[in-house]
Image (tube, grey):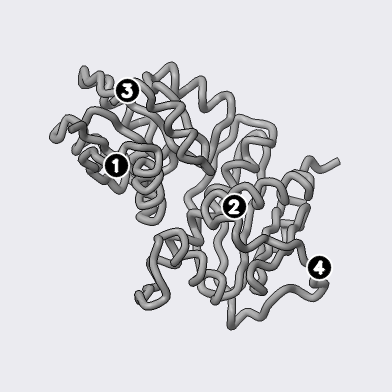
Amino acid sequence: MTIAPEMTDVHAIVEQVWSSFLGDEEPLLPAYDADGPFGADDAWSSAVSIHGGWTGTVTIELSKNLAFSLTRLMMAMDESEALDDAEVADAVGELVNMVGGNIKSLMPGPSALTLPVVAAGRAAHSSDLREVSRFDARWAGEPVRVSVHSPS
Amino acid sequence: MSKILVADDSRVMRQIVVRTLRQAGYGGHDIVEAENGRDCLEKALAEKPDLILSDWNMPEMNGIDCLAALRGSGSTIPFGFVTSEGSEDMRARAKSTGALFLIAKPFTAETFQEHLAGLI
């Protein structure tokens, strides 16, 4: 049997990270988009891997609009201030770092967490990994997907 | 006025830590920022801050190696981790290396108040 984080745990961690850094004014609403919440041209993604007592990859994919909105919120910037890719990469990377770090704490250890890898676009996983948990949500109408992959 | 050194490779997270310090009532202090463990070690020795808040997982040198090097140099500057990981083995390792506390992200201003009370 594969040990994997429960979807309810992933949901709870994402909710906690979200409300701590992005506020409670706009709720993070669970969503169920069978075909995926967004296209590759309109997405940002970030991933961290955990190696050790448990091995897996935690990935966050979100729409470009959401990536930019949450970066402004995390950096306390208003809409008139320009953002560059490095700032968005920093914010989206920090999100997956927090979610991945908390998932790591739930799983058997000891283990190590990699630094986040961020890309403008969807995330792709190699064939030796399979999805073991997924949480789809919408925030202010914009999609976000958190998934956990583990070696099959 | 005290000096606080904030080390994190994420500029966004450094901003959030500084903002949370302000919300927790520590806004009147000098803030020095470092972008990895090596930078933190160099600034700790040069600037002699009254408190260091450091991420664990950073490029160049991670937070625990920075703390070990700092203690190895004879420095007793109060040091706390602010990191995305809060497992028991990491907390034990942090404590045995000389950290006063480990705050796991996400955190609130109240979490900062709880751990920083009496330190600065």
Q: CA distance from mark 1 to mark 3?
A: 15 Å
Q: Is residue A12 above or below residue B73?
A: below
Q: CA distance from mark 3 to mark 2?
A: 28 Å
Q: Nearer the viewer, residue A7 or B114?
A: B114
Chain letter belonging to callout 4: A
Q: Which residue is mark 1?
A: B27
Q: Nearer the viewer, residue B88 or A81?
A: A81
Q: Which residue is mark 2?
A: A19
Q: Which residue is mark 4?
A: A32
Mark 2 secondary-structure assignment: helix
Chain letter belonging to callout 3: B
Q: Is residue A119 above or below residue B107?
A: below
* Residue A49 shows in this picture: no
x%, y% of residue A29?
A: 72, 63
Chain letter belonging to callout 1: B
Quadrant location, the N terminus of chain B = top left
Q: Which residue is mark 3?
A: B119
Q: Amino acid at mark 1?
A: Gly
Q: Amino acid at mark 4?
A: Tyr
Nearest to viewer (mark 4 / mark 2): 2
Would residue A13 appear left or right of A70 to someone viewing this image?
A: right
